[in-house]
Image: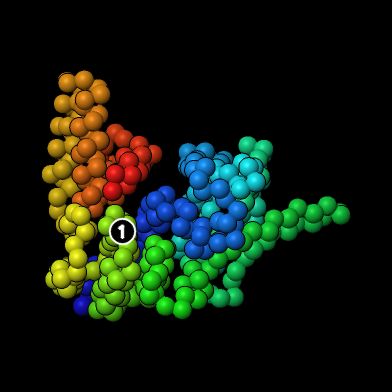
Amino acid sequence: MNEILQALVPYNNEYDTPWKDALTLYFREFMEFFFPEAAAEIRWSAGYEFLDAELQQIVRDAELGKRLADKLVRVELVNGASVFVLVHIEIQGQYEADFAKRMYIYNYRIFDKYDLPVASFALLTDDNSAWKPHEFVSSVLGSTAKLEFPTAKLLEVVSALPSFDGVRNPFAIIGLAHLKARETRTKPLERYEWKLYLVKILYANAFSKQNILEILRFLDWLLFLPKELEQQFRIDTSTLEKPVMPYITSWERDSIIKGLEEGFEKGMKEGMQQGMQQGMQKVSALVSNLLLQGFTVEQLVQMSEFSQEEILTIQREMQKKT
């Protein structure tokens, strides 16, 4: 039993990666699920632009510590205005006295840099119902600085769902998976049951095949199982409708990643020898194949010379073809 518990612990410290990927893939769905009123004011047909590099610079300048899953996005409103949306997710779910102050600092730094309106949103994943910061106020000598921002509590939003029948928003599944990952940290059998339940919901609610693949990756990361239970999980889900490509677990990914690294490097070398355009097409095809096999964006960035945005561009092109 001790070995099982030790196997679960390392993966519970890595909640940020699946949330980062989920926010990038499903930004609209995120806003619609957690902040529906704000989502209704965004002109989604105009598209949106992630500004990850710009936000990283702002965060470094602020020297406010490690931020896990923040996103800065440029969007257009239905009234035609161009604004920035700052989404901050407090993944670790711990009380922080200066949280509202940090939201204020991020907000004014972005405004100062771009001179455009900034809307800040916070998602808290802790289970403390009494902690729900939504404003920062500083007053002195008749002068007041203030920021009010919408805050969503993951537990409250997920618990408010009447049922999961017919739910099509990926964050209903991802949100529940995150909560259950925290609850079952030392309960592998209970975690197994929840993971199986969530996978059945994916198929019962007719998610698209590509979305099933993506969400399965999130479940695999959030609800990591010891080897024996993972094998049983594979057996129990084998009767469900299989997605386009086989879903592979983190154990399987870890076992083949080294071999694929060599193939990746070979593909890059061939690209240099046969011409940049043809070579990049080959590497792009290889990246697409690895994404379909279940590799995360973070893994492919580490394995290749591609940036995160380039990998995500390939991923979006894949989704257009499905």
Residue 77 in sight: yes
The residue nearer to you, when weighing 124 against 99, is 124
Residue, x 32% and y 41% (percent of image)? Answer: 317
Residue, x 22% and y 34% (percent of image)? Answer: 283
Find residue 298 and report its horizontal and vertical position in percent: 32, 47
Q: Which residue in the protein does label 1 denote?
A: 208
Residue 5 in sight: no
Quadrant of the snapshot with the N terminus: bottom left
Above or below, 100 against 304 in this view is below
Position of 127 with respect to 118 (left or right) is left
Position of 219 with respect to 72 (left or right) is left
Find residue 259 and report its horizontal and vertical position in percent: 13, 44
Find residue 124 and report its horizontal and vertical position in percent: 52, 65
Position of 67 with respect to 302 (left or right) is right
Q: Amino acid at mark 1?
A: Ser
Residue, x 64% and y 42% (percent of image)? Answer: 81
